Amino acid sequence: MLLSGYPHCHRNSKVIFERDGLAKALMSILHSENDLYELLTHSEARPKGSYNHVTWEIRTKGELDSDAALITSVHEAMHDQLNNCTAYGLILIIVAYLTRSKAIDKQNLLKLVNACRTSHEIFATYTSLLIVSRESILQDLIQQDYPSYFKYVQLAQSLMPGVHKKHLQYPIINSLIRVCYQNPFLVQYLRRGELLNLKPTDCPDQRLILLSGYLTEPRLKSWLQTFVETHESPAEARRFVEAENDLDMITEDVMDFDAIGQALSNFVYEAIKTDASVGFPVMEFDAHLDFLDDLLAYANRLAPMGKASMPLVSNKYPEKIDGVSWYESEAVVFNEQLLPATVIPFADFPEEQLHRLLSRAEGKDYFYIISRITERFLTQYQFSESDRNWLSEYYPDFVITIATKQNVDGVISIVFVMLDSPDQFNTLGKKEFPMLTNSSMLLTSDHAWEPWYEIIEHYSTHTLLFDLSPSIHLERSITINIYDKVYYNSFHLEMEQGNYAFIVMICNGPKVAQGLFILPCSAVMSNLLQAKLEKLGERFQLIDPEKNLNEDMQWLLRLQMTRLLDESRFDFKALSSQYALMGFTNDRFHTA
């Protein structure tokens, strides 16, 4: 039974993959031994960040749009940026891949991490603060709540004596750290097969120590003066340098201050590279890209990428990656404490007792059913070992299950009743209660899941969990499905335990029923996604929920977002699962 008046996804609403894109994966890594999660362990109530070498995780603590949450999110992204855009960072990515593949011992990665620990944290910490940037954050939030974190603020500031304007600090600190990671000797280490035996003096932190003695207030002042004099537009460069803040630069004849900031960064980089008194050599600004293919070949020899669930690919144009693409490496953890869960086969549940599986929200009873990739489902809840083994054996690919939340003596848990046949929906349908189903977007492409599609569409209001790359599938997988209008907005679900961000898309077409896509994400990703959707043309239209959505639709959205909070972790990496790798290998997915 449909939730009256609510959308469901048409059978043609399925994900279509291009074979050329199957192996694509963002090269994103940061050392797990040296991240914000470790630094913030003293404050259990604050958002945390961590890496697993494929994605970065943000543990929101329900503070999704707080200053601390924003800084945490941007902090992890800046770690990722430094790795993707420098020679030493690329080596970290490669060695982490080899560590994940068990081709080398993890001590090799730890050794490299220890040799760049301080410089990496200075970069990620200070640039994230400059991006989020309010003066009170620097002193109050960081110094009071994150004292371990604050030392990197002080170290960053000590590298720029006499430079106090944040719009100048940002391009300068970028270049100061970058030169430490752009050591031309790294190429020679690779060619000699000695990548795992770098001398400490060839690593970033030792280079930063040398650089710190070189950076004096007169030198930085001289750089700024020379930058103005040699810039192609000295008047604009002077206005940039002399402005008290970036707001002073927004005038009727607006300059491209992003371009001037990049020009300043390039100038500082070149000034250091060409000055022998620095004490170490520096490669050309983008020369690290010249040996990227050699690095990948080295990794492929030790751990063939054809067998990897997350292969690395060459991207020699990292500056063309937009914010959404970059932030697809971010995962949000809404609940660190997994809900206890038990599983029961549908066949073992008496039909006369099915009413016990009803959920209730705002005075309305309904069945809630989810479709998930099994390997991901197992990570979202706290199962007993026997239940975990049973699920892995009998549902190796995906699960379709009724989910019922229980509260026994104040302890919240979930009971899952596993569906084995689409025909079992007919039994549920006899009860004449509405059904709400939510399915992994990736599953809609699987031939093996297809028999469930029509029955789910027939009996229920069907929503999709957007767990694929938004940069690829926002346009292809939605507009290819003959939706001619996509209405969207960001939603912040305010609950007693905190505030959670989602992007919601309601899709309409002349020949199909409505489709409803839900994207749980961080506040930063929410803003980036909304900005991207604004640029996709007339087919995508921002809506005002209170003006454009009736009460029934608003209730449905609240219900679906609230039920997703039963789960723990959300990301856009379903294609990196073993299930996806197996599916493409066995031609199980719809492709184009």
Image (cartoon, rainbow, N blue to C red):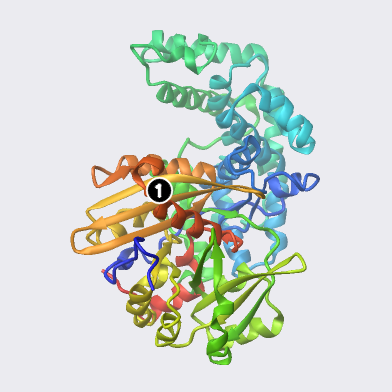
Kindly indicate the quadrant of the structure image that contains residue 481.
Answer: bottom left
> Is residue 412 toward the left or the right of residue 430 in the image?
right
For image coordinates 62% across by 87% down, the residue present is 390
> Percent from the top left, x then y, of residue 383?
68, 76
Placement of the N terminus among the 4 image quadrants? bottom left
For image coordinates 32% across by 68% down, the residue present is 14
Q: Dot 1, how many residues are within 10 Å of its Cα: few (below 14), some (14-19), or many (20+)?
A: some
Q: Which residue is mark 1?
A: 316
Q: Is residue 218 above or below residue 506?
A: above
What residue occupies the far front of the structure in this picture?
363
| Amino acid bearing label 1 | Lys
For image coordinates 55% across by 15% down, the residue present is 223
Placement of the C terminus among the 4 image quadrants? bottom left
> Percent from the top left, x then y, of residue 431?
45, 80
What residue occupies the far left of the structure in this picture?
510
> Is residue 281 visible to the viewer in this orientation of the structure?
no
Q: Is residue 183 above or below residue 109?
A: above
Depth check, front residue: 568 or 147? 568
Q: Is residue 181 above or below residue 577?
A: above
For image coordinates 56% across by 56% down, the residue present is 55
> Percent from the top left, x then y, of residue 4?
36, 64
> Percent from the top left, x then y, of residue 114?
73, 49
